[in-house]
Amino acid sequence: MSPDMTLAKPTPAFYDPADFDRYVMKTYGRFPIALTHGEGCRVWDAQEKEYLDFVAGIATCTLGHAHPRLIEAVNQQIQTLHHVSNLYYIPPQGALAQWLVEHSCGDRAFFCNSGAEANEGAIKLARKYAHTVRGIENPTIITAKASFHGRTLATITATGQPKYQKNFNPLVPGFVYSPYNDIDALEATIEELDAQTPQVAAILLEALQGEGGVRPGDAAFFQRVRQLCDEKGILLILDEVQVGVGRTGKIWGYENLGIEPDIFTSAKGLGGGIPIGAMVCKSGCDVFEPGDHASTFGGNPFACGVALSVCQMLDEPGFLENVRERGEQLGQGLEAIARQFPDSVVDVRGWGLIRGLEIKQDLELTSIMVVKAAMESGLLLVPAGPKVVRFVPPLIVSQGEIDRALEILTGALSSLV
Ligand SMILES: *Cc1c(COP(=O)(O)O)cnc(C)c1O
């Protein structure tokens, strides 16, 4: 194959929603633009309109678009070895696992391709632990209301939001929900489940609920959960898919809560946009044996080599500091906007570079309306539910870009209220 061989250009170009929808299943509500290229925190659509990207593939493009380190890692790995089976030892997989273990409370990692799949792995591990270590015949996992854990059958069941489950029953047995950040309710739920014989295998929580409306975990709640788990032998699983890998200004979301989970999952930001998921656990609950769990693509040299280069960027001097400083700047800017629009904005919350702005419930104004108005003016944002606008820019975002985003948002809100 000659290196200058060009790829055939598809016809039509699929910039037009009608062309696209003819061939692709309509599982997504899409905005009517087609993004064709990007650089740093900016992306361009097919009409060459420029946008400031505060979605970043939903908290995924850690290093933004076309980052030189990402390009270098992709090139290097694709030219060396991009895929082999887990029938063999895979050095980049070992190196990424080492990075994860050395930068977390975990001891061992399993790799897969997405957040849902990482959570599936955690659910299986917790169930096997319950069966083999604690002798629980019908293990139950408690998750939070308003949570989000993915779109596979087990993870929509784990997700404490009926809208994701509607029409997909029968769901997977063994999940019970309790309100987030509510320790009394959780204790009551455990007591009820464990009344006859121990049944609660694990508690699965997000350190900050992302899809559920950018709701940070309460440190006192999580510390009490940790205590309860220790007392009863229950595993604490943290879903770090959205907040892990530096997004909150710390490498893991749980570091904001003063606790350590037994198992945690990662995906979105881990590969900087290259698909990869990971489940990390402490050695004490690593009950998997050969044959228990697997994934064809999971941990392949390509995904792991690229993810390692993304992770190594977090170790660069000033990288996490930038997340904290820009996060602070964004948070303060949103607070100022809340003060400027007191009749529309009720709350601003989040950690680091995951922030949410909540619109008053009784207003006609919705998060989608704000997102659309901002998009018109060249800023990409994503809703987190009907009333919360979410801000999750690449972690390399600059001071000037945050200023510009706040300026566009102010204009968009002024045009709406
Ligand atoms: C996005 C997300 C998931 C699902 O990840 P996929 O890669 O889409 O499967 C799971 N948990 C949380 C907290 C998420 O934000």
Image (spheres, rainbow, N blue to C red):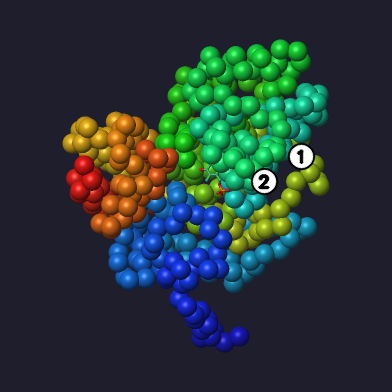
In this rendering, would 383 be left or right of 119? left
Q: Is residue 161 above or below residue 9?
A: above
Give how far across and how far down residue 312 sits, in percent. 49, 51
SS at badge 2: strand
SS at badge 1: loop
Mark 2, residue position: 110
Ligand 1's quadrant: top right
In this rendering, would 118 be left or right of 5? right
Kindly check if marks 2 and 1 are in contact, taking CB atoms under 8 A apart as contact.
yes
Mark 1, residue position: 288
Distance, label 2 to label 1, CA atoms, is: 10 Å
Amino acid type indicated by mark 1: Phe
Q: Is residue 321 above or below residue 72?
A: above
Q: Is residue 73 above or below residue 123?
A: below
Q: Residue drawn 28% across and 57% down? A: 376
Give how far across and how far down residue 345 sits, in percent. 27, 34
Amino acid type indicated by mark 2: Phe
Which mark, residue 310?
none
Q: Residue drawn 32% across and 31% down? A: 362
Give how far across and how far down residue 297 sits, in percent. 67, 58
Q: Specify few, some or many for label 1: CA neighbours under 10 Å numbering under 14, 14-19, or 20 or more.
A: few
Q: Residue drawn 42% across and 70% down? A: 16
